[in-house]
Amino acid sequence: MIMKMTAIQSETAFLDKLQQTTLAGDYQLDTVLGEGRFGIVYKAMNTNTGEDVAIKFLKVWSVPEHARQNLIRRFELEFETGQIKSDFLIRSIEMNQLDGIPYFVMEYCDGGNLERKLNKGLSTSEALKIAEGMLSGLNDLHKNGKIHRDLKPENVLFDSDGNPKLTDFGISGHINIQLTIVNQDDRPEQIFGSYAYMAPEQLSPSKRKNTLLPTIDIFSFGVVCFELFTGHLPFGPWENHDDIDPYIRRAARGDHDEIPASGSIPAIWISVLKKCLVSDRENRFQNIEEITGQLFGNNNTKYQKPCGDSFSMLILDGEEYGSRLQIHLQNFAGIGRSSTTILNEISVKETISNYISRRHATFELIDGSVYLRDGQWNEIQQQWVTSKNGTYVNGILIDSREGHQLYCNDVITVGNTSIKIY
C-alpha cells in the first residue's frame, strides 16, 4: 500500500480543506487532540457505529518534496505497527486519504497522556503499574521487529481503565534523529522535547552505530521511569535551549542524579533503572526479557522450537517490509545487501543507506540445527570477513566464530532491517 499525494500541497490548503468539511470517510471530525511536526491528530466519531476514534493526518508538507514519498511510507509503517495484537499498543483501525493527504484511524484513549499525569503527581504503586505496562508494550513491539525510537511521556496514553498504551511509533523516531536541535522552523518544541529521552547514540554522530536495536528504547524507558519515580529528569533540568548541552553531556557519560533510596521505590527497580541509563549501549540491558527476568524472574517456560533446515523469514522493517522468504538450507547460505558483485543466497534490499554489508552474515546447518554467524568467507582474501555493523539476534550481538543457534520466532537485525524466523 503506497500512497501518493496528488492534491493538497501546503498546510494552508489543508487547513482550508478541513474548514470546508468535517468528514473524513465515515468519520465526523471533532476537536484537535494534538499536533507535532509531522502529524495532527483529531478526535472523531464513526458515523455508522458512534464509536469515538482518533485520526492522524500526515503533514506531508513538513519535509522537502523529494522526501515526501519516504515520509508517506513511514506513515504506512506506523499504521501497520498499530496492527500488532497487544493490550499495550494503540490499535490501528483503517487507513485512507483526504484529497491526497494520508490519514489513519486508531483507537481513542480518553485517559490523557503520561505527561499530564506526571504534572499531577503519581504514587509509587501507580508509577509501577505504568512502568510494567510500558515494558509490555515495548516487548510486543520488539518481538515483532519494531523499535519505537521516540518513547516519551506524550507517547504513553491511557484508556478509560487507566491502562497505559504506547503510541506514535514510526514517524517521529525515524525523522527527528536526523534534525538539529536548534532547528527553529515549524514547531521546534515538539522536537526539543524528544531529545531529553533519546539514547546518546541517537544524538552523537561519533557514537552512533548504524544498527537499530532495542537498546535505544531501553534507554528512553529508563529516562521515563526515572521521571515517573522521582518527578524529574535524570540528567538535569530541561526547560529551555540553554539546558540542552549540559543535559546531553551528562547523558553521554551516564551521569544521572541519584535515585533516592527512600524505601518507596523498590530496590530492584533502582538497580534496573541504573542499568537502563548506562551510556554505552553494549553495557545496557540488551532486550526487554533481560529486564523482566531481573524484575520478575525468568518464568518463560514456553518451549522454543529449534530452527530446522527449512524455515521462513519475514522482513518486519526496512525497505522490503512484509516480504517473506522460504529457505531450504543444505549446508550454508550467505545473507547481505543486494549487490551486482556479490551473489548472496539471501539478499536484502538497501538503497537509502549502506548499513548492511554485502557479506553480512552466514547461515550454517550443523547436525540438523541452524546457526547464524556474523560475516562470510571471502574466497579472494582467503579469510573470514566480518560485517561492518554487526549481526544481532533478539538484540544480542553474535560473534563470527561459534555463531548463534536459531529458534523459531527469533528476530535477526542487520542494519535497520529486522527479520523474523518461523
Image (tube, grey):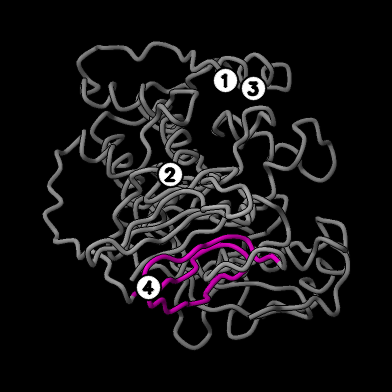
Residue at mark 2: 400
State if disc 2 and disc 4 touch (CB < 8 Å): no
Q: Secondary structure at mark 1?
A: helix
Q: Quadrant of residue 295?
A: top left
Q: Is residue 258 visible?
A: yes
* Image point (69%, 39%), residue name: 191
Q: CA distance from mark 3 to mark 4?
A: 56 Å
Dot label at residue 239: 3
Q: CA distance from mark 2 to mark 1?
A: 29 Å
- Residue 48 located left or right of residue 132: right
Residue at mark 4 to residue at mark 1: CA–CA distance: 43 Å
Cβ–Cβ under 8 Å for marks 3 and 4: no
Identify the disc placed on residue 252: 1
Q: In what quadrant of the picture does the C terminus appear? A: bottom left
Residue denoted by label 4: 329
Circle 3 packing at 10 Å, graded few (<14), some (14-19), many (20+), is: few
Q: Position of residue 134 (x, y in %)?
A: 36, 46
Query: As drawn, which residue projects farthest toward the bottom?
Result: 48
